[in-house]
Amino acid sequence: MKSDGINNKTDKINCMHCKYFSITWDPKHPRSCKLYGFKSSGMPSDTVYKSSGAPCDGFIKK
């Protein structure tokens, strides 16, 4: 994987390398996206893709 958090156009975005990614204290929803303002149990980029059908376009490398 490249250090920018994205392998190529067909691979998933690695939220761990994103400026907007954070860890929460909620055990049921331990990950959050500060850009879109939600918490999730999985990676926020997966939630964005499942709900919109498009990859997250807000990724900014930390």
Image (cartoon, rainbow, N blue to C red):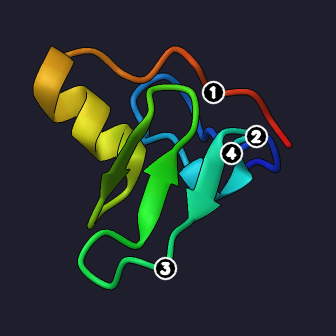
Q: Nearer the viewer, mark 2 or mark 4?
A: 2
What is the three-letter code of the residue carrying label 1? Phe
**Disc on the earlier residue, 2 or 1:** 2
Q: Quickly name the residue at label 3.
A: 25
Mark 4–mark 1 distance (CA, rounded to whole Å): 9 Å
Mark 1–mark 3 distance (CA, rounded to whole Å): 23 Å
Residue 60 percent across, percent down from the top left: 74, 27
What is the three-letter code of the residue carrying label 2? Lys
What is the three-letter code of the residue carrying label 3? Trp
Q: Quickly name the residue at label 2.
A: 19
Q: Quickly name the residue at label 1.
A: 59
Farthest residue, direction front: 25
Tag shown at residue 44 = none
- For image coordinates 61% across by 49% down, the residue present is 21
**Disc on the earlier residue, 4 or 1:** 4
Q: Nearer the viewer, residue 7 or 23?
A: 23
Q: Quickly name the residue at label 4.
A: 5
Q: Residues within 10 Å of mark 2 (few under 14, many from 20)?
A: some
- For image coordinates 42% across by 42% down, the residue present is 12
Residue 54's place in the image compared with 21, above or below, is above
- For image coordinates 58% across by 19% down, the residue present is 58
What is the three-letter code of the residue carrying label 4? Gly
Label 4 element class: loop
Quarter-wise, where is residue 61 in the image? top right
Q: Nearer the viewer, mark 4 or mark 3?
A: 3
